[in-house]
Each structure stands twice: as structure tokens, then as C-alpha cells.
Amino acid sequence: MAKKKDKHQHKTNAVRIVEATGIPYEMHEYEAPEGFLDGVSVAKALGQEPGSVFKTLVTVGQSREHYVCEIPVDKELDLKKAAKHFGEKKLEMLPSKLLTATTGYIKGGCSPVGMKKEFPTAIDASAEQLEKIAVSGGKVGLQMVLPVKALQEITGAQFVDLTVDK
């Protein structure tokens, strides 16, 4: 079951950065007994619709540059759409084994805020319809809910259609 937590108990880079901006946010903790929980299960644990809970996907282009894509947890990233947006011929998912070295975060706890470097970021266009968005708080079992526009400003992201059409 998700619980609201004292903001001072979980000072990840993501939380520190959001706090420093003065943006109102909420922290929610959830159980991840296997060390990782899929996004739809996280949304259920938070009592939120999967369309308002976003996962952070890190990609790498042919140029070897890295790009961050935020998409709803119940959707799939369209690598062709993302590549076109970022001006790459082709994008691939960053291998999990390189995630920590590249971002400073682990799988299931990768936040779009507070990575080792600032990477070009895109948020799926569906987020424009939302007031608030839930993203990783920077570690497994921790979610941060904040205004969509604030996330866009902090990450320098653009809203783009990034998901596979079904």
C-alpha cells in the first residue's frame, strides 16, 4: 500500500532539486519486495491511473548521445518517433547495465530529475492534459508527484508524441 512520507526521509538528488525550486510536490512510498516493480503495479500501489504515472526511459542514439523519454507506464516507447524528435537516425534503449554509470540511478528508480548529466528530455504529449504527474523520486519504492509544467521546466523537456499507436 502506498503511503505519504515525511519529505525529509528520502533525500535523493531528484528530491533535493525539486525542493530547491520551491515547487510543491508529494512523496509516496510503495513496497517493491523483489527490488523492482513494473509501472502499472506502481500506479495501482499509488491508487493512480496508469496514464498519470510516467516511467523514465533512457535511450542512446547513433551519435552516442543519450536522451530521456517520459511516457505513461502502460504505454510503449516508439523509438522511431523519439529518434525523429531528437534528430537521430536511430535510437536504442540504453542497456540496463549502463544505466547507473550513465544516470546515477538504478532500474526502477530512475528519475528524470537529478541525473549525473542533463540529457535532452521529452515528455509524452499525453501529459499536457494532466495537472500533475507521478515520476520516480530517485530510488525504487519512491514516487514524486508534481505539476506537469514544473517537471517540464526542471528537465527542459518538450511535449512530444512518443508512444506506439495501438
Image: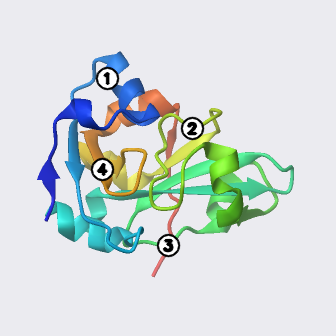
Q: Secondary structure at mark 4?
A: strand
Residue name at image x 78 percent, y 46 percent = 65
Residue name at image x 65 percent, y 33 percent = 117
Left or right: where 62 falls relative to 104:
right
Residue name at image x 54 percent, y 67 percent = 77
How far apart are the two marked residues, 3 and 2, measured between alpha carbons?
22 Å
Numbered label attached to residue 19: 1
Q: Secondary structure at mark 1?
A: helix
Placement of the N terminus among the 4 image quadrants: bottom left
Q: 146 above or below 29?
A: above
Location of residue 79 by image quarter:
bottom right
Say what amino acid the circle numbered 1 marks. Glu
Say what amino acid the circle numbered 2 marks. Met
Instruction: Looking at the image, tell me whether mark 4 or mark 3 is earlier in sequence order.
Output: 3
Q: Marks 4 and 3: which is nearer the front?
A: 4
Left or right: where 133 falls relative to 85:
left
- Residue 31 versus residue 158: which sits nearer the camera? 31
How far apart are the two marked residues, 2 and 4, measured between alpha carbons?
16 Å
Q: 12 above or below 129?
A: above
Quickly name the residue at label 4: 143
Does residue 94 appear in this view? no
- Residue 89 versus residue 18: which sits nearer the camera? 18
Q: Are marks 2 and 4 in contact (CB under 8 Å)?
A: no
Quickly name the residue at label 3: 76
Q: Position of residue 5 (x, y in %)?
A: 16, 42
Colour setting: rainbow
Quickly name the residue at label 2: 115
Q: Position of residue 133 (x, y in %)?
A: 29, 47
